[in-house]
Amino acid sequence: MKILKSNRGVSLVTLIIYLLAVTATVAIITRISAYFYQNVDQTTEDTVSNSEFIRFNTFFTKEINTEKNYVKDIDEGGTYIIFEKSNHQYTYLNNAIYMDYIKICSNIDNCVFSMTDSKTVRVDIIINNKSYVNVYRII
């Protein structure tokens, strides 16, 4: 009488199924992480643009809200604006916006200051190909 031995182990079919499952899992994780990092780069560019505009808006709103402050001079091309009471000058020069001689924003593609009437200032800014328009009312 022959004693049959039990062959316990991994069959070739089980090994192939295991490798296919691991390969599919790695492929899915790779696609998800590539999509995630692509969106992170895009979000970072938008965040930089928004933070530059918010920084400018903070300084300019404080200027506009200064009591009895009005526009003393504005360039025809809209590259600078000067306020009377504070005597601050906001200038768009070399892809940056300056308040007097202090750079308050950088990476600016374009900035135009304009007056719509005697009490309203309009600012058009393009940062990283994203356009921002804000209208300020002088008190």
Image: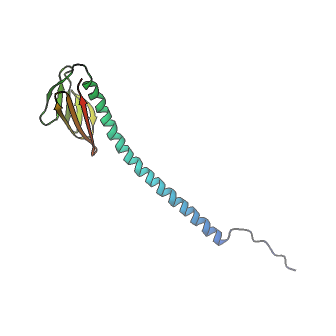
Relative vertical location of residue 111 with respect to residue 120 in this rendering, above or below: below
Residue 78 appears at what percent x and percent y?
16, 35
On the image, which quarter does residue 93 sit in?
top left
Please give the name of the residue rendered at 17% of the width and 21% of the height, measured from the top-left corner. Answer: 84
Please give the name of the residue rendered at 20% of the width and 35% of the height, measured from the top-left corner. Answer: 92
Q: Nearer the viewer, residue 41 or 68?
A: 68
Relative vertical location of residue 86 with respect to residue 95 in this rendering, above or below: above
Residue found at the far right of this picture: 1
Instruction: Quarter of the image for the N terminus: give it.
Output: bottom right
Left or right of 5 in this view: 28: left
On the image, which quarter does residue 109 sit in?
top left
Left or right of 125 in this view: 36: right
Q: Nearer the viewer, residue 124 or 138?
A: 138
Residue 127 appears at what percent x and percent y?
27, 41
Please give the name of the residue rendered at 17% of the width and 32% of the height, measured from the top-left corner. Answer: 115
Relative vertical location of residue 67 with respect to residue 75 in this rendering, above or below: above
Residue found at the far bottom of this picture: 1
Question: Could you tell me how many numbered marks the image carries?
Answer: 0
Residue 135 appears at what percent x and percent y?
24, 33
